[in-house]
Image (cartoon, grey):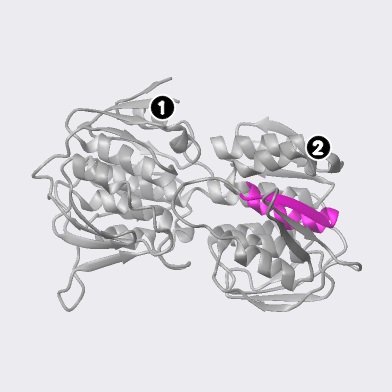
Amino acid sequence: MATFMVEGGYRLHGSIEPQGAKNEALQVICATVLTSEKVVLKNVPEILDIKNLIVLLESMGVKVECLSKGCYSFEASSLDEKYIESDDFLEKCSRLRGSVMLIGPLLSRLGRMTYAKPGGDKIGRRRLDTHFIGIQNLGADFSYDGQKKVYILKTPVGGLKGVNMLLDEASVTGTANIIMAAVFAKGVTRIYNAACEPYIQQLCRLLAAMGAKIEGIASNLLTITGVESLHGAEHTLLPDMIEVGSFIGMAAMTRSELTISNVSYENLGIIPDSFRRLGIRLEQRGDDIFIPAQEHYQIESFIDGSILTMADAPWPGLTPDLLSVMLVVATQARGSVLIHQKMFESRLFFVDKLIDMGAQIILCDPHRAVVIGHDHNICLKPNNMTSPDIRAGIALLVAAMSADGVSRIDHIDQIDRGYENIEARLNAIGARITRME
């Protein structure tokens, strides 16, 4: 396991550009399995989760070629059905959360799919009910083998059929799976309460470029008319909004002047205003974000004077993936805030590391924490920490960059899963981070 040694207290300067979007990449790479023709994806992030997914696709018989940095072609002209039914396939899927989005494509393409419960971050329950119920609504047979601990899905004779369905939750990956299962379903499928994040929009645009018929893109009602087949296409991924938010948090915590370039501002939604509510000044300059150096930033209160609550919500609400960073940012703000992580009940457990660093945080329950800001009057102390998941890992890195001294962060392969070459990119703008294998 690799480790970061972080010498904090240094200000950042210059500009940094976000990588391609991790969550979009996982979806669109899985979508390439829907056609036997070549699909070219650009701006693919070179991160651990994506590399592992590409290895899985290659094991399945997909021809993958790296055309240039971040540009890959995928050709699923000859899938290895024997391998897809093997124990090795199941074992690889169980170690990669993103593999869950192969369920819809493989069921559509092959008519059957066996899948093991996926791994990923240890951030609480991440149920798959929405995925399976939605695909069952299309007519698939579903069963669970308790002895082998695998899910088994099969299409009925005659294939999947379009239907109207109301999702029990606006699950992003669940919506993606149902969309990819529905593109070949006979007739019309209407998905109500569909997730409508920019990455779902991007998936729909790729599928449309491949020949799918999808209406209602960017809304929570998607209408999909089934087609016989899909063809090849080219697609460019959006910048990663979570990385953009992480860089905003780093600038605030280190009191740095920083430009984040090529952010696709129109696709950031409520993220910039959420940081503004924490008192952080930032300016849109074309498609860049400029953050001036701030010695102090004041957390807003609600209009009636009560304490501000920052909570995650389905898009266009605030993404849960940024609440960990915002919590860290609040530790050095002026004022107090209640962080309410609604979706995952284990994501706030990393705050004990911040408390050890001197942060004033009250963990109310698994979902809520009150942060009382130091207003940069008391610096965080360096600490030895372990990254429990991707987003907590980057939040701990933000904290360590602001601490006065050297911190150690172990298990940074969690950070590598979501952030490309992060220490080199940050060191180029003034950070002091050393990777130790």
Task: Please identify the quarter of the rendering in which residue 17 is found.
Answer: top left
- At a point 78% along the width and 76% down the height, the residue shown is 188
Magenta stretch, overall SS: helix
Is 308 placed left or right of 347 in the picture?
left
What amino acid type is highlighted by mark number 1? Ala
What amino acid type is highlighted by mark number 2? Gly
Between residue 15 and residue 404, name the one nearer to us. 404
- At a point 48% along the width and 34% down the height, the residue shown is 416
Tag 1, which secondary structure?
helix
- Which residue is at the far top? 437
Q: Is residue 232 visible?
A: yes
Residue 76 is situated, as x and y percent measured from the top left of the image, at 81, 43
- At a point 20% along the width and 32% down the height, the residue shown is 382
Is 233 placed left or right of 377 in the picture?
right
Between residue 226 and residue 115, name the one nearer to us. 115
Number of numbered discs visible in the structure rendering:
2
Tell me if residue 171 is in the magenta stretch: no
Q: Quadrant of the C terminus?
A: top left
Is 112 placed left or right of 405 in the picture?
right
Task: Please identify the quarter of the rendering in which residue 50 is found.
Answer: top right
Q: In whole angstroms, how far apart are the C-alphas of marks 2 and 1?
A: 34 Å
Label 2 sits on residue? 61
Residue 341 is situated, as x and y percent measured from the top left of the image, at 36, 61
Tag 2, which secondary structure?
loop
Q: What is the magenta range?
A: 99-117
Query: Residue 424's mark?
Result: 1
